[in-house]
Amino acid sequence: MDYVKLGIIGAITLTVIWIFSYTYKTYNRLVKLRLDTERQASHIQVHLKKKFDLIPALTEVVKGYSNHEKSLLTDVTKLRSQWGAANDMPTKMQKANMLESALSKLMIVHERYPKIKADKSFNNIQKSIGYLERELVRERKLYNKRVGWYNLKIQEFPSNIIAKAFKFNQEEFFTIENE
């Protein structure tokens, strides 16, 4: 009879140790996935900042050739300020989408003004923006992949129990809004 009690105590002890170990490992995995997602979001913000920092130079070049595009230049400048002031990722994503749409309109301006097309500063800025856009595409894909891994782990059983207990929330994918 003492062996039966000892066996039961041993089984309970092993079960408690297994539960603690699983919780510990799953919690740390969720933290790592969340931090990877946040780090990747930061990479996107850095690339967007580099891209948007080219806007003042671009607006100066366009302003020098065209007074007809003042409202577009004002919109781009205003959106750049709003993007910089945004504090959370969903707002930053929304403002970045709006700003990129306005910026693409500004880049099309050169089609209407052949002198801008020939301007060396404009061409250099356009090349820099093109390079940064290719980098952003790569960073966004990686961000969305990491968000997918993180969100999947939060939804999978039994890790979803630990995710709920420790209040891990799903992240939003980075999407491009169409006009």
Image (spheres, rainbow, N blue to C red):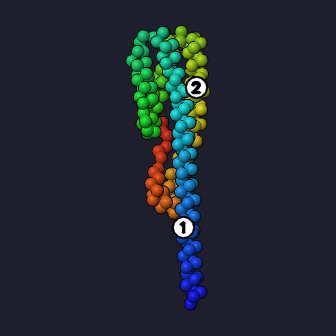
Residue at image point 52% right, 17% down: 57
Amino acid identity at mark 1: Ile
Q: Secondary structure at mark 2?
A: helix
Q: Does residue 122 appear to the left or right of 165 in the view shown?
A: right
Q: Position of residue 145 (x, y in %)?
A: 56, 45
Q: Amino acid at mark 2?
A: Gly
Picture residue at 56% right of the left edge, 90% below the top: 1
What residue lies at 59% left-to-right and 12% top-to-bottom? 120
Q: Which residue is mark 1?
A: 19
- Residue situated in front as seen by the camera: 21 or 159: 21
State the residue in front, 28 or 169.
Answer: 28
Residue 101 coordinates in the image, percent (x, y): 46, 28
Left or right: 90 in relation to 51: left
2 or 1: mark nearer the eye = 1
Q: Is residue 1 left or right of residue 79?
A: right
Residue corresponding to mark 2: 130
Q: Could you say which quadrant of the image residue 16 lies in? A: bottom right
Q: Is residue 94 visible?
A: no
Q: Residues within 10 Å of mark 2 (few under 14, many from 20)?
A: few
N-terminal of the pair, mark 2 or mark 1, is 1
> In the rendered image, is residue 161 in sight?
yes
Q: How many marks?
A: 2
- Residue 167 image position (x, y, % from top left): 44, 54
